[in-house]
Image (cartoon, grey):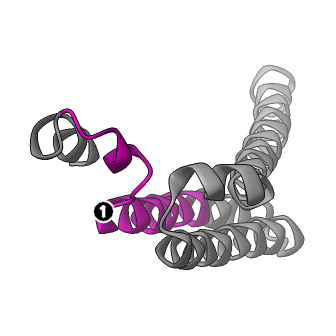
Amino acid sequence: SWIYYLMVTNFGNPAAVTATPWTVEVAGVVQSLVGAIVQSFNACRVWRLTKKIIWPSLAWSGSAVRVIFNVFTAYVIAHTNNVIIFSQEYTWVIVVPMALALLVDILNLATLTWYLSRMQSELDQWVFHG
């Protein structure tokens, strides 16, 4: 909807580029909530597979912090109300949630891959040498 806002509603108005509509603020929060749900689902899979709580708790904590950062980002965007000022002064607020999402995804991927490959090798050993 921001593209429509810029290209149709405010066509020819360069000052409109700096103003942020409410949909930009909400989109980041919704995206982080959906991402946290998916990451939490994968962390539950890790927990059921490994029977250890340490790896899923790290993933859940990272996802929760990411959501908190994105809510803070929406708050700052709403009060700054200028995309250019926000992107210059608050770059870390954008980078930290993306880095957390990446770290949680890598954690889930690594633990699932490790334990599934280990289980597969144990199964192969049991079937072929049993």
In this view, the residue in front, 63 or 90, is: 90
Residue 7 vs residue 80: left or right? left
Tell me the residue at 64%/78% (across/down). 68
- Position of residue 14 relative to residue 82, above or below, is above
- Position of residue 8 relative to residue 35, above or below, is above
Q: Is residue 27 magenta?
A: yes
In this view, the residue in front, 60 or 122, is: 60
Q: Which residue position is annotated with label 1?
A: 23
- Position of residue 98 relative to residue 25, above or below, is above
Tell me the residue at 34%/38% (across/down). 14
Region rendered in magenta: 12-41
Element type at mark 1: helix
In this view, the residue in front, 26 or 65, is: 26
Tell me the residue at 76%/67% (across/down). 62
Tell me the residue at 85%/71% (across/down). 52
- Position of residue 4 relative to residue 61, above or below, is above
Asked whether residue 104 is in view, the answer is no
Q: Outermost residue toward the left?
A: 8
